[in-house]
Amino acid sequence: MCGIVGYAGNKNVESVLIVGLACLEYRGYDSAGIAVVDEDEIIIRKEKGKIKALEALLKEKPVKGKVGLGHTRWATHGEPSRINAHPHTNEKNTIAVVHNGIIENYIDLKNELQSKGYRFQSSTDTEIIPHLLNDELKSGKKIDDALMSIYKRIIGKWAIAVVFESEPDKVFFAQDGAPLLIGKGKNEYFLASDLSALIRNCDEVAYLSSKQWGFFTKEQFQLFNFEGVKIEAEFKKQELKWEEVDKIGFPHYMLKEIHEQTSIFRRVLEKRINDKNEIEFTELIASKEFLTKVNRFVIQAAGTSLHSGMIGKHYLEQFAKVQTDTDMSSEFRYRNPVVEGDTMIIAISQSGETADTLASVHEAKAKFLKVISMVNNVNSTIARESDAFIDTCAGVEIGVASTKAFTAQVLHLFLFSIYLARLKWMITDEQMKEIVDEVKTLPTKIESILQRASEIEKWAKDFVSSKDFVFLGRTYNHPIALEGALKLKEISYIHASGYAGGEFKHGPIALITSDVPVVCIANKSEIYPKMISNIQEIKARNGKIISIVTEGDTSAKSMSDYCFEIPDTHDFLSPILSVIPLQLLSYYVSVARSCNPDQPRNLAKAVTVE
Ligand code: F6R
């Protein structure tokens, strides 16, 4: 998704902006640009493609200055091109704007501006902003009033940054629903849409809330609401460490993050399970009583987070005995769902910024429902707008394909379900001990899978030319079949579909030929014999079987072309283990096909537009 950086200080603005933009690369983008305020003019440099292309342009045509803005664009309105790249300016080049999000009423505003004679260069919604500002200033308004007037006119979820030739020391910024934060240095201020762009340079950051705007120079910072009332910004020490956003020797972030799962599980279990072997959610203390009265949960999420939510449904129904529905957030918001006052929403989002999931939180609030979110970014908009949030503690996830955040979500959904079941006296002390003992073995089991990653790496070359893949699983592992397919297609561009084993013969089995690898998750469980039937049906049609089985398995293994053994655990914990070989499979197939797993085409790390 798009990224914003801004700077006012004594350093060379060109390098500060480029370094900041490079830190935002992981979010996904197709063009990049900067605006630098020189003494008497605004200089724009922008280019289609990677930041390297912009750097090459800057080498050819360097810029000098101490104040400026930068942007990485992920195309929404208009193709990726130099013209559509940000910053956008008014005709006289005296105002430059970068923008994240979408302006929903841009067509009306564009028509209005065109009827007044304004000419547009790009196909973007962003370009209306410098023209609107130009129009307001032309009518005699001061810059502050012009800005406040347009904030009320542009509808949607957005964040912007603006520089004016007439105010060469200042960077102006505003947000209404899209993240933006300010970093404070020594005689310098920074602006960014994501913390990762600030950590190298500032210790203190302040997150903006919706409908806030302001400006900074190198020495001064001011914040207001959209009515012009001054607000005290709360600068806090930022805790993110540089190692957390470094590859520390791994060839890709995705592989680093897959390998981090062992330490994350150790850390989470230490934090969530106390000395008395009870599960703790200190952040939910205020909601405890309400939680025991919830009659129905509706889980809201998208993509990989939706798959963890699907496993969460099993957990909440199985252990806490609360009816639970899992719903795509993009659908929930538009179908006027039936909900009662004792329904609670659980919004799951790694980034905490996904536009659809945020909108479903707003929809829930409009229906007076309580919302708990489960996020990996506790400073995110979704966390801030929920009644309570659970930190999944996975650390910053940079690879676009979600891996460690997914398993951390599943673990938290499991722990939350057991926590709730205990609150409701539904689990005895003996059962609790048995569950906790088993869950504590997970880090070692994950580690043992990762130690055998090379087994899967060897398979990858056999699938370089595959066109289609099928993934099958049942009950707890049905969402893992969906997740395995999503992971493979997003980073290797091989078409892949996941199905519940039982549904397979109702249509998808028609896909099977000797060219179609079928990944069957056939761990030890009550439905193991059913998965064996699936495998036999595929074998009978010459399908190629890749099975994920429990160690010691013989039946599924004997029928498989490729087989990976995962350590024995309860069926309900098996998705945490079975997903890891599938993450590795998609990673190694992607690399074998010379794709970049960290930055797959067309994808963005946080989908902040609808
Ligand atoms: C896939 C992936 C996406 C996200 C989805 C929701 O690997 O990462 O499907 O899971 O865009 O994102 P969050 O969890 O940030 O709301």
Image (cartoon, helix red, strand yellow):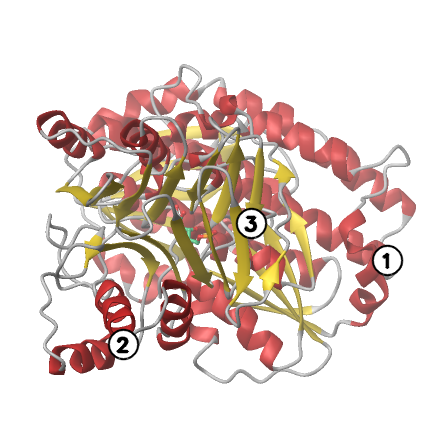
Q: Do the residues bearing badges 1 and 3 touch, measured as CB atoms within 8 Å?
A: no
**Which residue is outermost to the top?**
249
422, above or below 168, in the image = below
Distance from disc 1 to disc 3, alpha carbons, whole Å, reads 35 Å
Question: Residue 245 location in percent, x, y?
Answer: 46, 28
Q: Quadrant of the C terminus?
A: bottom left
- Name the one closer to the observer, 231 or 347: 231
Tell which circle, 1 or 3, labels the residue nearer the N-terminal end. 3
**Residue at 36% across / 34% down in the picture?**
20
Is residue 515 visible in the rendered structure shown here? no
Q: Nearer the viewer, residue 588 or 305?
A: 305
The image quadrant that residue 119 belongs to is bottom left
Pointer 3: what residue? 207
Determine which residue is flagged by label 2. Answer: 139
- The reply to whether residue 158 is visible in this rendering is yes
Q: Which residue is mark 1?
A: 423
Tell me the mark number nearer the camera, choosing from 1 and 3.
3
Q: Is residue 283 left or right of residue 137?
A: right
